[in-house]
Image (cartoon, helix red, strand yellow):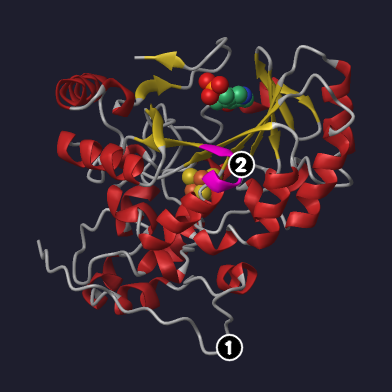
Amino acid sequence: MITASTAVRITPSAAVDPADWRQLWRDAVTDTGELLAQLGLQHLVGRLPPADAGFALRVPRGFVARMRHGDARDPLLLQVLPQLAELEHVPGFVTDAVGDMAARAAHGVLHKYHGRALLIASGSCAINCRYCFRRHFPYGEEIAAAGQWRQALEHLQQDASISELILSGGDPLALVTAKLEELSRGLAELPHVTRLRIHTRLPVVLPERIDASLLAWFDALPLQKVLVLHANHANEIDAGVDAACRRLRDAGVTLLNQSVLLRGINDDADTLAGLSERLFAAGVLPYYLHQLDRVQGTAHFEVDDAHALALIEALRQRLPGYLVPKLVREVGGEAAKRPL
Ligand SMILES: *Cc1c(COP(=O)(O)O)cnc(C)c1O
Ligand code: SF4
């Protein structure tokens, strides 16, 4: 194993405006050979699965810049690099692991838990994470933002028990701000919805998305605002992410983080403690540590429950309680996420 830690120098393609998140989004690395060449890992090209194992490589250049040069076990690289192991069929690992479609309440709306409705706001992500259920999700039909969010807003209107609206996806901040403004105009007529929560990986993988127009939208929103980031390793958080988090907090947004427990990436106590402390330094509290959803092609990332519990116990012994995430598993048909 090579552990040289020379920082990777990644320059955006010539014509890209570094202040325009949509240009940066389009400028992501999508060619596995190019990614490995930038990291000095050309020798791995022969070990890649054909056709990216059916789920394209995609990673923003700013995220590549946080990977260690020459390290084939880099925890950021392992989250995005297609692996031969993804082609193995392992019993119990299926395409709809969470049974989400059974909770579909209206077009693009999942209503599974009391008081909270979740909208599949967008099918796009700036990054493709290998462990994600999204590799099999039939997004084509199921985007709540299609039209003017009409069906989603109608569902919210009919159920006064819903006080929290959750935007998920895909990545909801993939939507242009004008699309989010359409939603907030609709929400203005729904007094029982008092909280808006957004689950997004963009402040971490493309912090340029937290631009002036998005901050103005947050600022003007007359709801309580929660944003759940998704970082799995402290190395994902750099000065650009710190700055994005600061701008969000200044706009009145509460910041939480959820991670997925991933073998070979964050399945040791030092790494998880380092993540919690780095998150807190960025003004973010750890919320959930998820056991992997058993999605086809992801079995090589799974950590067994006994080890997961031992890790949480180790965190309890060395961190303040507020830096210990809740270890949970998503189980279809239950009234809440199941604590381990
Ligand atoms: C995870 C999830 C939620 C939110 O659950 P919390 O425990 O409040 O974070 C809501 N709706 C759906 C469909 C979910 O999968
Ligand atoms: S939904 Fe989240 S975890 Fe899945 S690919 Fe998109 S950013 Fe990654």
- Residue 195 in percent (x, y) is at 68, 27
Instruction: State the residue at coordinates (55%, 59%).
Output: 126
Magenta residues span: 249-254
Q: Which mark is residue 137?
A: 2
Q: Which mark is residue 321?
A: none
> How many residues crowd mark 1 within 10 Å: few (<14), some (14–19), many (20+)?
few
Question: Residue 253: within the magenta?
Answer: yes
Q: Is residue 85 left or right of residue 315?
A: right
Q: Secondary structure at mark 1?
A: loop
- Residue 324 in percent (x, y) is at 30, 25
Task: Specify the amino acid type for callout 2.
Answer: Phe
The outermost residue toward the front is: 250
> How many residues crowd mark 2 within 10 Å: few (<14), some (14–19), many (20+)?
some
Q: Which mark is residue 15?
A: 1
Q: Nearer the viewer, residue 262 or 54?
A: 262
Instruction: State the residue at coordinates (71%, 42%).
Output: 121
Instruction: State the residue at coordinates (58%, 67%).
Output: 25
